[in-house]
């Protein structure tokens, strides 16, 4: 019998009618709408072109050659497993995946909407929908809600609502506005709520709470996305943002104050963490103290202690994981397929992960394949 396999990073592609009837009347005309442009179907939000639906049309196609991948598409081409829960289960069965932690696709582009009221309405509508989606197969699908923290108390209420609807965790911005970094005490009520609700918090690639400087002039988020998301240099250095947020939380004492809080880095791979941990510990123990540098309450604690207790890394296809696992921590590693996005390991997930974990003891492989994810998201 094959070992269980749980993906901690899979996605839906939102259907065109998702926000119909799911946003307050005041935001109805500004909510996301799918529009058939001459070259592709695009999501528009608040009159701004956001993104196409290509993320859901070509899972597995890269194995035939990356020259076949496209950046545009029509919703009619989106795989049913991206928006229909029964079809998603069939795709999981084909790929040998027993359970998925399910994230948004389109809403990742929305974190750059400046109007917090509009963004919260969009996210709340999505949260309602993804909760319904996952209730179709609650033992195999675990939905992740979206929570904006521009106003912390409002964020707490939305997190509580997500938990009440049965969602398994929440995604917050991977990197908030520079003036509101996660080391600030203003977030403590939210960290406390996430801890008490047992809701892991995800820092997913591409969810910076910033607005590209060109967005207001060209009224086209897809153009600014090209600058923000699509250069090879930026793709290659994306862990910078999650490192900054995690380091701010660790040095800011968040995990010392909230020892049960669990935070995941999602879709940034994992091997970067080996150097990151060493750099944090060296900085804490070997550099001259500045007046504003915090110290932990426990005199024996070092930054990597909190990482190993409170942080998990969801990787997809990182070939260095096995070699660096003793530094990163086997307990800290979980896997994700990224279905149905173009870079997904579908339909070769088991083959891909077996190659990456080759040589790792069987007990450690089980931790990465399913035991760590089961503990975080209560699969049963």
Image (spheres, rainbow, N blue to C red):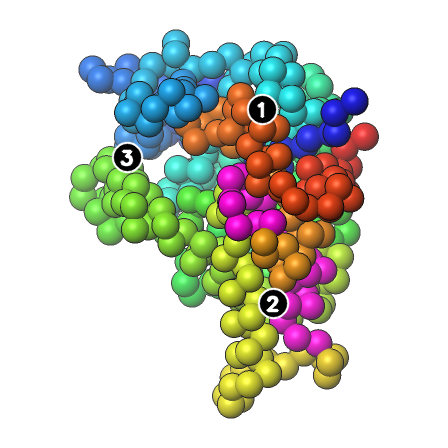
Q: Is residue 66 above or below residue 255?
A: above
Specify which label sits upstream in the sequence, 3 or 1: 1
Tell me which segment is drawn in magenta. 301-322
Label 1: few (<14), some (14–19) or many (≥20) C-alpha neighbours in 10 Å: some
Q: Kindly tell me whether residue 220 is visible in this rendering.
A: yes
Residue 15 in percent (x, y) is at: 47, 18
Q: Is residue 325 above or below residue 247?
A: above
Which residue ends up furthest to the top in the rendered image? 76
Query: Of the numbered discs in the image, which one, if any, rests on residue 116?
Result: none
Mark nearest the camera among 2 and 3 is 2
Residue at point 67% right, 32% down? 6
Query: Of the numbered discs in the image, which one, if any, rests on residue 250?
Result: 2
User: Relative to the observer, which residue lies in front, 311 or 44?
Assistant: 311
Residue at point 45% right, 54% down? 239
- The quarter holding residue 29 reads top left
Residue 203 in percent (x, y) is at: 54, 49
Tell me, yes or no, whether the two marked residues, 1 and 2, touch with CB atoms within 8 Å: no
Mark nearest the camera among 3 and 1 is 3
Residue at point 50% right, 57% down? 272
Say whether residue 184 is left or right of residue 5.
left
- Indicate whether residue 315 is drawn in magenta: yes
State the residue position of label 1: 129
């Amino acid at each position: 019998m094959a070992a269980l396999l749980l993906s901690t990073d899979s996605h839906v592609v939102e259907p065109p009618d998702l926000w119909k009837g799911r946003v307050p009347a005041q935001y109805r005309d500004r909510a996301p709408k799918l529009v058939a442009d001459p070259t592709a179907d695009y999501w528009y939000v608040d009159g701004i072109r956001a993104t196409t639906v290509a993320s859901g049309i070509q899972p597995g196609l890269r194995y035939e050659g990356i020259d076949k991948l496209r950046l545009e598409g029509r919703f009619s081409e989106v795989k049913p497993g991206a928006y229909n829960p029964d079809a998603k289960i069939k795709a999981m069965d084909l790929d040998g995946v027993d359970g998925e932690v399910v994230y948004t696709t389109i809403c990742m582009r929305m974190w750059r909407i400046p109007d917090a009221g509009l963004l919260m309405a969009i996210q709340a509508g999505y949260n309602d929908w993804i909760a319904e989606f996952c209730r179709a197969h609650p033992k195999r699908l675990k939905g992740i809600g979206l929570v904006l923290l521009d106003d912390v108390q409002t964020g707490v209420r939305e997190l509580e609502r997500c938990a009440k609807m049965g969602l398994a965790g929440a995604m917050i911005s991977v990197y908030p506005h520079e003036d509101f970094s996660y080391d600030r005490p203003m977030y403590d009520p939210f960290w406390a709520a996430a801890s008490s609700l047992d809701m892991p918090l995800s820092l997913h690639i591409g969810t910076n709470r910033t607005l590209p400087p060109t967005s207001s002039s060209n009224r086209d988020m897809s153009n600014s996305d090209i600058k923000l998301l699509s250069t090879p240099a930026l793709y290659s250095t994306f862990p910078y943002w999650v490192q900054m947020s995690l380091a701010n939380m660790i040095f800011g004492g968040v995990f010392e104050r909230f020892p049960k809080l669990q935070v995941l880095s999602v879709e940034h791979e994992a091997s970067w963490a080996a150097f990151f941990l060493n750099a944090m510990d060296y900085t804490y123990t070997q550099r001259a103290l500045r007046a504003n540098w915090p110290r932990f309450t426990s005199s024996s604690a070092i930054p990597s202690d909190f990482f190993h207790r409170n942080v998990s890394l969801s990787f997809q296809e990182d070939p260095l994981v096995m070699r660096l696992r003793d530094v990163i921590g086997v307990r800290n590693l979980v896997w994700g397929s990224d279905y149905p996005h173009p870079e997904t390991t579908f339909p070769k997930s088991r083959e891909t992960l077996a190659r990456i974990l080759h040589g790792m003891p069987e007990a450690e492989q089980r931790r990465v394949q399913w035991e760590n994810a089961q503990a975080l998201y209560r699969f049963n």
